[in-house]
Image (tube, rainbow, N blue to C red):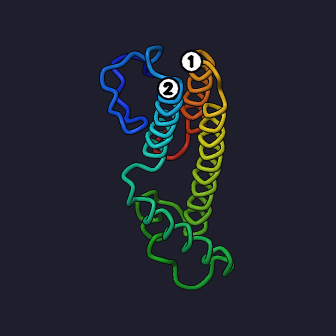
Amino acid sequence: MQKMNLNVVFDGQSLTGFQFGELPLGAAMLVAQQQIDQAADLARLAVLGEPLRVVEYNVAAHEARAFADADYSGEVPPSVQAWVDAAGLSAWEAADDILAKAAAWKEALYKLRAIRLKGKQDAAKATTHAAIEGIADTAIEAIKASVQGVGNAA
């Protein structure tokens, strides 16, 4: 976690340019929680890219699921067709590939959420700067590891 030149608003005060160990314990908890959230935000961006791309991915996954549920018959949905054309796959292969990728990024997001929430709660319960720092470092590393090889982070 970042420990130098920290800025945080705590108890109505703006604390600017502090080192982690100099912060009041409550402010240190808040800084750790903010850094855990920030690491999760960056990890989600690494997996999904630009935030609105999630909409595109959800549409593709929904269309691929409907196509697969229809035994891969009928008109190929536009999102699936786009992957057929781009990757040179059959419609069946494209739909299955879309669904596999959607499942992978969804699983990564579930892991990411669990790590983020637990890290923040553990930091809130810690009673020393060293404990808070250790918790934040562990959570941030776990967040980074949870998205390795998934989606755009592959």
Q: Secondary structure at mark 2?
A: helix
Q: Which mark is residue 32?
A: none
The kind of residue tagged 1 is His
Q: Position of residue 86 (x, y in %)?
A: 41, 59
Q: Between 147 and 4, which is closer to the camera in this rendering?
A: 4
Judge whether residue 154 can be spotted in this image: no
**Quadrant assignment, res 12:** top left
Q: Position of residue 149 (x, y in %)?
A: 55, 37
Taking the view exactly as shown, the residue that stands out farthest to the front is 12
Q: Position of residue 59 (x, y in %)?
A: 49, 70
Q: Neighbour class for label 1 at 10 Å: few (<14), some, many (≥20)?
A: many
82 relative to 97, above or below: below
Circle 2 is placed at which residue position? Answer: 28
Q: Secondary structure at mark 1?
A: helix
Judge left or right: residue 138 versus residue 22.
right
The kind of residue tagged 2 is Ala
Q: Neighbour class for label 2 at 10 Å: few (<14), some, many (≥20)?
A: many
Q: Between 41 and 80, which is closer to the camera in this rendering?
A: 41
Q: Between 71 and 102, which is closer to the camera in this rendering?
A: 102
Looking at the image, tell me whether mark 2 or mark 1 is earlier in sequence order: 2
Residue sitting at x 45%, y 18%: 20
Judge whether residue 21 can be spotted in this image: yes
115 relative to 80, above or below: above
Q: Which mark is residue 129?
A: 1
Mark 2 vs 1: CB contact within 8 A = yes
Residue sitting at x 55%, y 43%: 150
40 relative to 20, above or below: below
